[in-house]
Image (spheres, rainbow, N blue to C red):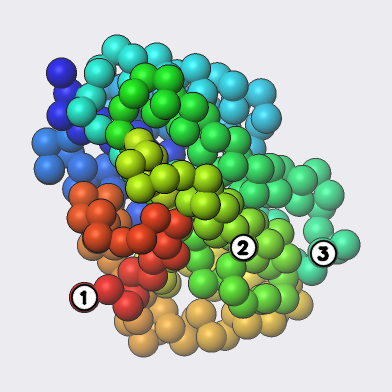
Amino acid sequence: MTETLAIITGASRGIGAGIAAAATDAGATVAACNRSSTGLEHQLNADLADPAAWAIFAQWYDDLVASQRPDRVVFVHNSASLTPIGPAGSVDPTAYTSHVRLNSAAPQVLGDAAIRTARARDRPTVLLQLSSGAAGNPYPGWSGYCASKAAVEMWVRTVATETTDDDLVRVAAVRPGIVATEMQAEIRSSEPSEFPNVERFRDLHAGGALADPAAVGATIWGLAQDGGWENGAILDVTTLG
């Protein structure tokens, strides 16, 4: 029997890769869902912006938990995108629709699937949804992203009201802070007409203020192990410790 099974979306790079590395170092069995390969034994290649992938993910997730029979499951949903950056009504509508599906709909649908498996397979599960400070701050040019992260946090808070103290499922949203990822590089490459706040993020990068994704990933993995947070919590990595 596997002691801990860690299932991570977007684990091929950045924060997700940091979480996967920390989980591996801790002796967990790690499984990943990505658009690109990670070389892990347990992996699903899927584009989570495509609604057709959601049922495939749910079946893969359930089969994995059934076959591994872990003592506990940690599911970290990390996959997200900022593309397209720009004011609503001015960006490519197909790209905007894909953005909303990946950032807002997928976290809820995949989270629902994880909860179903936890109860059907009788496996204690910690479910962490990656959020952002953008959940509480309206940045011009990020309408889809800000709205999606606010939706993620409300989903977490609502699911927590649906559980009891002895429930198998514990959920939290995690704001990782400003981290040296490809997403931040994309932000810095934006035009001011697309994202008026771009100079702030360029200044943060120039000043060395971006956190290391491996360190942030390790902190997030630690949160999944610690459990000293209230169910439904909104956890901010920048204020921990």
SS for tag 1?
A: loop
Say which residue appears at 72% left-offset and 70% top-offset: 141
Three-letter amino acid code at the position of disc 3:
Ala
Label 3, residues with CA under 10 Å away: few <14, some 14-19, many ≥20: some
Q: Earlier in the sequence, mark 2 or mark 1?
A: 2
Asked if 203 appears above or below 174 in the picture, the reply is: below
Amino acid carrying mark 1 in the image: Gly
Residue linked to disc 2:
150
Q: Quadrant of the C terminus?
A: bottom left
Whether tag 3 and tag 1 are in contact, CB under 8 A, the answer is no
What residue type is disc 2 on? Ala
Dot 2: few (<14), some (14–19), or many (≥20) neighbours within 10 Å? some
Q: Residue at x 64, y 65 (%)?
A: 146
User: For the residues carrying marks 3 and 2, which lies nearer the camera in this image?
Assistant: 2
Indicate the secondary structure of the residue bearing disc 2. helix
Residue to which mark 1 is pinned: 241
Marks 2 and 1, Cα distance to the nearest angstrom? 25 Å
- Left or right for 170, reference 192: left
Label 3 belongs to which residue? 88
| Residue 45, above or below 210 | above
| Observer able to see residue 222 | no
Lower position in the chain sequence, tag 3 or tag 2:
3
Q: Looking at the image, how many numbered discs can be counted on the residues?
A: 3
Q: Position of residue 68 (x, y in %)?
A: 25, 17
Secondary element at image label 3: loop
- Residue 7: quadrant of the picture: top left
**Residue 162 is at least partly visible in this image:** yes
Which sits in the foreground, 9 or 149? Answer: 149
